[in-house]
């Protein structure tokens, strides 16, 4: 079985939020991390450093995507179950 090359997607759709994925130069990134996730009311953004090997970029994408899923689930729970609001 031959594996196809995994490309970093430009957009990931989660229930209730569309996440843009950018592989970009470090000078356009905040801080010194290899990647980060931000969430706003109109969507999300995952930025990944372009100077990393593709294997590391895939790892960073998964890492940040798990943060995104956790945040989306947390916000969704708060919207549907007012008792859980802080």
Image (tube, grey):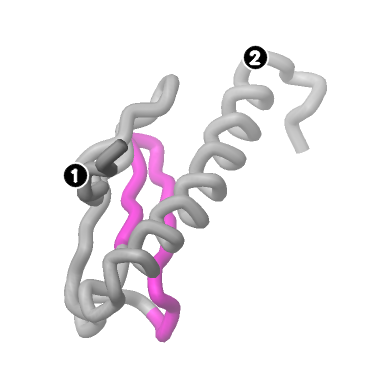
Residue 27, above or below 53: below
User: Left or right of 54: which side holds 86?
Assistant: right
Residue positioned 60% across, 40% down in the render: 70
Which residue extends farthest front?
1
Residue positioned 33% across, 28% down in the render: 13
Residue positioned 81% across, 21% down in the render: 83
Q: Does the magenta stretch include residue 39?
A: yes
Determine crowd level at label 2: few under 14, some 14-19, many 20+ residues with C-alpha closer than 10 A.
few
Q: Nearer the viewer, residue 86 or 61?
A: 61
**Given this view, does label 2 or label 1 mark the residue nearer the observer?**
1
Q: How many marks?
A: 2
x%, y% of residue 85?
74, 31
User: Left or right of 10: which side holds 44?
Assistant: right
The secondary element bearing badge 1 is classed as loop
Residue positioned 23% across, 80% down in the render: 51
Q: In which quarter of the image is the C terminus?
A: top right
Determine crowd level at label 1: few under 14, some 14-19, many 20+ residues with C-alpha closer than 10 A.
few
Q: Nearer the viewer, residue 61 or 32?
A: 61
Q: Which of 60 and 16 is in front in this view?
A: 60
The secondary element bearing badge 2 is classed as helix
Quadrant of res 54 = bottom left
Residue 52, above or below 6: below
Q: Earlier in the sequence, mark 2 or mark 1?
A: 1
User: Which numbered marker is on residue 80?
Assistant: 2
Reading the image, the residue beneath label 1 is 10
Q: What stretch is highlighted in magenta?
A: 31-47
User: Left or right of 25: which side holds 12?
Assistant: right
């Amino acid at each position: 079985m031959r594996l196809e090359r995994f490309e970093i997607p430009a957009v990931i759709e989660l229930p209730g939020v569309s996440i843009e994925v950018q592989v970009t130069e470090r000078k356009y990134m905040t801080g010194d991390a290899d990647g980060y996730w931000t969430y706003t009311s109109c969507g999300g953004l995952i930025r990944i450093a372009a100077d990393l090997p593709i294997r590391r970029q895939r790892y960073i994408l998964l890492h940040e995507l798990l943060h995104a899923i956790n945040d989306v689930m947390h916000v969704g729970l708060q919207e549907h179950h007012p008792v859980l609001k802080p």
